[in-house]
Image (cartoon, rainbow, N blue to C red):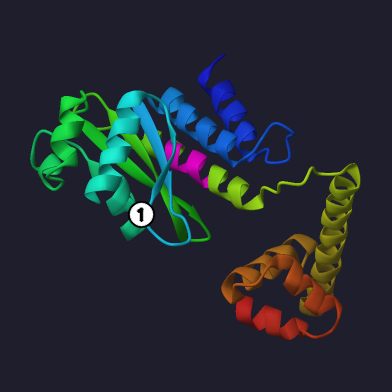
Amino acid sequence: MNREQQLTEALVSLADSFADDVDPVVLLDRLAANCAELTGAEAVGVMMAPLRGGLRTMAVTDDRAALLEFFQLQADEGPCVDCYRQGERVDALDLAGAGGGRWAVVGPLARAAGFGSAHALPLRVHQQTIGAVNLLVAQAGGLPEPELSLAQALADVTAVALVSWSPYPVRADDISSRVQAAIAAKATVEIAGGMIAEYGGLSVTQAQHVLRAYAVRSRERLTHVAHALVQRTLPPDTVLTTSS
């Protein structure tokens, strides 16, 4: 299996929160395993924050990662802790140098476990950080930027799947209803685009671009904007003026 196939399978497995054998623990285990396999990190750990604050280890790929996650929690320091608090990626490119000195307890333990560098990526949904993913690397220098971007994409997909997961089995009727809702939404957007095209003397393609641009600028969902146009609560000239 080539890398593209691996990545495709990983994304599908992380996004499929409707599968009968999937629960939050399975999704996080898959995230850790996929990050290790696809990025080249020697070990991966995943932490999440409960409602009362702090962090809790949710998944690890081996005992070394489990031990380091434990000490990060006990010492209240480390890449994952900083990443969660700051809501942004933390790179420790040389745990034997200044990069590891910022964590008096965890830095030496990471080096003793055989890691020369580490990255912590935020686990987030709609800009809200709910945890962190720790990538541990044997050599100093860390992972290349494309690998980190890939790991962040995997983390983002997993975070969305986690908040979308339900303990109740999905029914065939539920899936059919969502499909029909998507088709109905598309029809509404097309009608709204036609209204903009006619009102502004635009082509259908131009009108669709204007509609989407207005939704982005007003920070509204495209379907909400389309419904407002169709229901005559949003004047077409407002959309045309704001998007020009």
Residue 141 is at least partly visible in this image: no
Could you say where residue 225 lies in the image, as x and y percent from the top left?
Answer: 73, 73
**Above or below for 228 versus 86:** below
In the image: residue 126, left or right of residue 209:
left
- Indicate the quadrant where residue 93 lies: top left
Task: Indicate the quadrant containing the C terminus: top left, top right, bottom left or bottom right.
Answer: bottom right
- The dominant secondary structure in magenta is helix
108 vs 217, nearest the viewer = 108
> Residue visible at 27% across and 28% down?
137
Q: For this view, does 25 lie left or right of residue 120?
A: right
> Is residue 236 a member of the stretch shown in magenta?
no
Q: Residue at x 51, y 39 (%)?
A: 154
Q: Residue at x 37, y 56 (%)?
A: 54
Q: Position of residue 235 (x, y in %)?
A: 77, 85
Element class at badge 1: helix
Q: What amino acid type is highlighted by mark number 1? A: Tyr
Which residue in the rendered view is the most extreme toward the top?
1
Q: Please identify the quarter of the rendering in which residue 196 is found.
A: bottom right
Give the magenta part as a residue range. Answer: 151-156
Q: Which residue is mark 1?
A: 84
Residue 171 lies, in percent from the top left, at: 86, 44
Q: Viewer-proximal residue, 186 or 138? A: 138
Q: Quadrant of the N terminus?
A: top right
Residue 67 visible in the snapshot? yes
